[in-house]
Amino acid sequence: MKIIQITDLHISQEATNTFGVDVRQNFLGILKAIRSSAPDFIVLSGDLCFDKADPQTYRWIKSHLDFLKIPYAVIGGNHDNSKMIAGIFETEHLLVGEELYYKRMLGSHCLLFLETSAGTVSDGQLNWIERELKHLEKDTVIFMHHPPLPGGVPHMDKNYALQNMEDVQWVFFSFPHHLSVFCGHYHVEKTLSKRNLTVHITPSTYFQIDWRQEAFKVDHLRPALREINLRKDGVVDSTVIYFDGNKI
Ligand SMILES: [Fe+2]
């Protein structure tokens, strides 16, 4: 089962200053690569919009995704509005109040998609995750925008980390099997592990952040995708692939 995850698209409205990066062409180039790779499923793990949620941007993204005719799932990031995403991507039935979190079966794999657009995981959602995990008797894959472990990127850990990550970790660590968590938000490629948790941070399709610096600094402008293979032998095999970035 092959999944492609893309994250932190930060697609802007036409007139926005994107610091010289053609975010739309980056996205379209990556969609072209996805098409030739022919995955079973695509995940967009948040920050679809540049800064603020914008219905026209969501519609533009959806029209290009639909053209591929590959099933996909979308979750919100801190620059998104999950209710707006649900309305435009036709997943309103999955809304829990203003929150968009859900499970989805992919063959025999149950995937959980979490809501962290407010920078936190609500108590209601934490209860839901706990309940869902209780029914799962095997290793599981989770997608969420914010990493549930500190990412080792000083600027992001200090200013934009998931607020209640210890509560989330408590629920994840109570699960008796392994959890592979795929995130974005940090604009870096990183793998973090603790106890039964492996957290894969996938780089953005916009720009990457230099994790070696205390203050914010752009590392490079090569956009990326992550290919995830849920192999028959139970191994979760994942690789990040980089592309040349598009400039305006
Ligand atoms: Fe983010």
Image (cartoon, grey):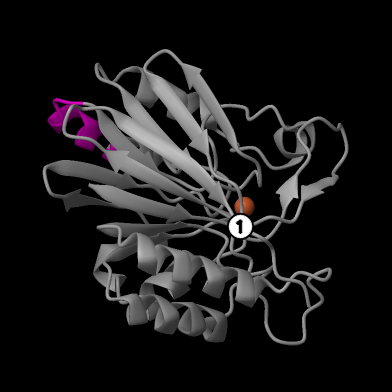
**Foreground residue among 164 and 237:** 237
Q: Is residue 205 visible?
A: yes
Which residue corresponds to the image point at 61% horizontal and 57% vertical from the top-left? 243
Q: Identify the main secondary structure in magenta.
A: helix
What element does badge 1 sit on? loop
* Magenta residue check for 74: no
Q: Position of residue 143 (x, y in %)?
A: 39, 45
The magenta-colored residue range is 128-138
Q: Circle 1 sits on which residue?
A: 243
Question: Is 135 located above or below residue 8 in the figure?
Answer: above
- The CB of the residue at mark 1 lies under 8 Å from ligand 1: no
Residue 206: x percent and y percent? 67, 61
Where is residue 188 shown, x and y percent of the image? 65, 41
Whether residue 57 sits left or right of residue 125 in the image: it is right
* Residue occupying the far top of the picture: 195
Res 74 → quadrant: bottom left
**Residue located at (24% from left, 16% from top):** 176
Horizontally, residue 16 falls left or right of residue 185, namely: right
- How many numbered circles does the render carry? 1
Q: What kind of residue is marked 1? A: Phe
User: Residue at point 27% right, 27% down?
Assistant: 235
Residue at image location 88% in from the left, 38% down from the top: 215
Image position of 74 with respect to 20: above or below: above
The relative height of residue 136 versus residue 11 in the rendered view (above or below) is above
Asked whether residue 132 is drawn in magenta, I would say yes
- The residue carrying pointer 1 sits among few (fewer than 14), some (14 to 19) or many (20 or more) residues within 10 Å by Cα, namely some
Q: Can residue 183 be seen in this view?
A: no
Q: Residue 117 at x, y = what percent?
A: 53, 54
Q: Which is nearer the eye, 90 or 208? A: 208
Query: In the figure, is residue 116 to the left or right of 208?
Result: left
Comparing 96 with 60, the one in front is 60
